[in-house]
Image (cartoon, grey):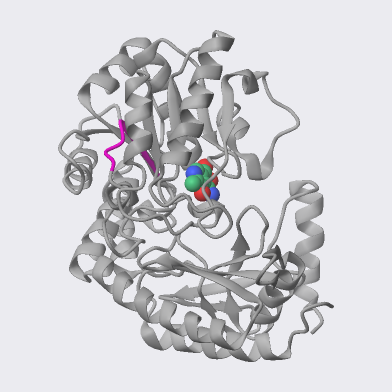
Amino acid sequence: MTLPAKSVELIERRAKLLGPNVSTFYDEPVHFVKGEGVWLWDADGRRYLDCYNNVPHVGHCNPRVVEAICRQARALNTHTRYLHDGILDYVEKLTGTMDAALDTAILTCTGSEANDIALRMAEAMTGKRGIIATDATYHGNTALVSQLSRSNIPTVGFGLSQYCRFVSAPDSYRDPDPDGSKFADAVAEQIAEHEKAGTGFAALILCPYFLNEGFPDNPDGWLAPTAKVVRQAGGLLICDEVQSGFGRTGTHMWAHQKLGVVPDVMTLGKPMANGHPVGGVVTGSEIISAFRKGYRYFNTFGGNPVSCAAAMAVLEEIEDQSLVAHARSVGDHARKRLNLLKEKYDVIGDIRGSGLIFGAEMVLDRDSKEPAGEFTDRIINAMRQRGIIHSKLGRHKNTLKIRPPMPFSVENADLLFDTLDDVLAETPLVA
Ligand code: PMP
């Protein structure tokens, strides 16, 4: 396939106008012009099944969300220093889905900002600055948070890396830790290192489902021993649910509920308003008071009436369409189909996932578990050529990442796996 002339032109203009190193997906980047539900269309009118995008959580151009945005934009949009029902109704409904201790929120425009605030809350609450994160994660792009984003380590910054220490992300396939005690011990070790270095321990931040790190198959309740270690040391547990939240795992609205903990602070983003830029930090009154005492935080756009209308429509859609239960049943079907492929193809070493986040880890050899990263790359590009959009992730970049909009159906899953079957059959293990 050769790229259409228009795509070539857009690639050149991107490099010129946006600067070098602005990444695109695929050897042949796609130029999308339209979306609806789980479908995307390119500029030539070709339709693609979206098995990747979690931002359009309730479906591309979801009519309820589009209508809510238009209705509120026609009425009023301002910053948050005037009184308005929208932000309050939204925070009330959002926190109503969580443990009673999480009853207050700050709304932002991105997940990065939300994580930055969460870390400053930990500093305000503990008087310490030592942060612990997992070693293959991504938490965002502010000066502080980018130090924790190990999948994209910055070479420029403000010397904030001195406050960050890392533990290995869990890996249920290569290094099982069935009760979570190994992970808890590793966190305890890094807490001791922070104390020794004089930074002290402020917080552990992690995605409770380790979604960017290959979503290991950790049993329900797996994080409980770690939470105990964190609290005994006087630190905060921050759960970054930017990817794992809003029912994606199909068992709970929030992944931390599945993993058996209540975070002190929880951060949100991506799917929160279906593509309208909304993020948030949810915590309890003691922590938010400590933060607000130290810092009179204001965000011009965060929590504006249009953003809140979009975010509210997403929550209503999840509820009305029973999307959490839907994610569970379609996800169960998808994993059955993936397991059948695993029986057929030795290159599939492991199947993981819950609800509508699932995938397969590709290996060159099932005994040595040598990662098949380059092969995975070819599979993803071949799937794109056949009209299926997904990606890869994990420490070895060899795990298929399938994370579609939540209305993804059993029929959609069948199309995905029929196509994957064909592509696996015709792709040689070594190029
Ligand atoms: N946390 C996680 C887990 C993420 O995956 C991301 C974005 N991929 C972020 C935070 C940052 O969110 P944003 O891009 O909205 O700043």
> Would you place residue 280 above or below residue 423 in this image?
above
Tell me if residue 302 can be seen: no
Asked whether, in this view, residue 41 is left or right of residue 245, the answer is right
Q: Nearer the viewer, residue 350 or 357?
A: 350
Q: Residue at x 24, y 40 (%)?
A: 87
User: Magenta stretch: residue 265 in it?
Assistant: yes
Span colored in magenta = 261-268
201 sits left or right of 264 in the view: right
Q: Which quadrant would the C terminus be assigned to in this image?
A: bottom right
Q: Does any portion of residue 80 appear in the rendered image? A: yes
Q: Was residue 375 drawn as part of the magenta stretch in this picture?
A: no
Task: Give the image location of residue 73, x and y in percent.
Answer: 33, 51
The extreme front residue here reads 367
Image position, residue 122 (x, y; %): 39, 21
Depicted 144 relative to depicted 112: above or below:
above
- In the image, 119 versus 33, the foreground residue is 119
Q: Left of 287 or right of it: where is 430?
A: right
Residue drawn at point x = 81 percent, y = 51 percent = 16
Residue 288 x, y percent position in the rendering: 28, 22
